[in-house]
Amino acid sequence: MNTCVYVFTGHYGSGKTETAVNFALKLKETEKNVALIDLDIVNPFFRSADAAELLEKAGIRVEIPLFANTNVDIPALTGNMAALIRDEEWNVVLDVGGDDLGAKAVGRYSDDIKSRNHVRYFVMNPNRPFTKDMMSATKIYDEIEAASCVSCGAVVGNTNLLDETTVETIMDGLPLLEEFSKSKNIPIAYHAVTSNIADELTEKHGEIFNSDNIIRINRTVKRLF
């Protein structure tokens, strides 16, 4: 069975949680057994646990830390998570906490992840201050690489300005994504694009963007504070 573990890492605010959730929904369109594990035990502001009901209605299994979305300071990872990561019956999407601190959760499961087909993505938004240029993006990337103990396989471009995002916004971010991809010798696997402009983007720039490499983003998680 050709299943895989998909690991989404990136800087705080890169949009990796929304990307991971919507990637799981995209994957479910073609794969039978899809699960999402919320490994974000660091950042309480955006959580894939918020999208659990939506995912489960779509037939996606969801595992979240104990005490997620409560007033407990540090939610706890569960034994079910390790078992699911090892289970080759499942395609598993991991939503990882921001930066190197969050990536240590991946390091905890690195042997299990590397025992299977796997790919780790670096979600990058060129409009965020800590990934706005090569120097800052490289610093974050290298810190996550060291902490996760799982080599990065591809970049996911998530160029956006929230509700102000346009096709031009995405095109303006593309040169930095391409430069970064070349510097790390890894491809740009996907572009996370809000659904309201995805069709316009493919119509205007179909030589770059298509249904295979676009993850359509529908907002699913909320702020807790």
Image (tube, rainbow, N blue to C red):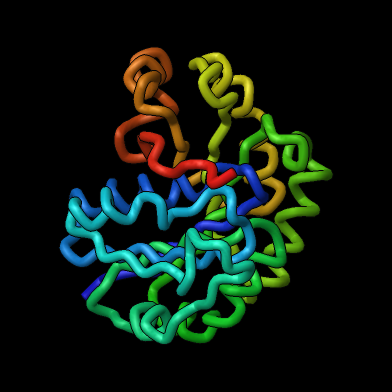
Q: Residue at x 52, y 81 (%)?
A: 109
Is 6 situated left or right of 172 in this image? left
Is 25 situated left or right of 118 in this image? left
Q: How many marks?
A: 0
Seen as rendered, the residue at the extreme front is: 71
Q: Quadrant of the N terminus?
A: bottom left
Place residue 170 in its image quadrant.
Answer: top right
Observer-nearest of 43 and 161: 43
Observer-nearest of 189 and 123: 123
Q: Residue at x 81, y 44 (%)?
A: 136
Q: Is residue 151 visible?
A: no
Vertical arrangement, residue 142 with respect to residue 87, above or below: above
Vertical arrangement, residue 130 with respect to residue 88, above or below: above
Q: Position of residue 163 (x, y in %)?
A: 51, 21
Q: Residue at x 61, y 43 (%)?
A: 14
Q: Is residue 209 visible?
A: yes
Q: Position of residue 5 (x, y in %)?
A: 39, 69
Observer-nearest of 46 and 149: 46
Place residue 152 in its image quadrant.
Answer: bottom right
Vertical arrangement, residue 110 with respect to residue 123, above or below: below
Q: Residue at x 59, y 43 (%)?
A: 225
Is 51 situated left or right of 175 in this image? left
Observer-nearest of 2 and 92: 92
Q: Position of residue 190 (x, y in %)?
A: 45, 42
Q: Position of residue 177 (x, y in %)?
A: 63, 37
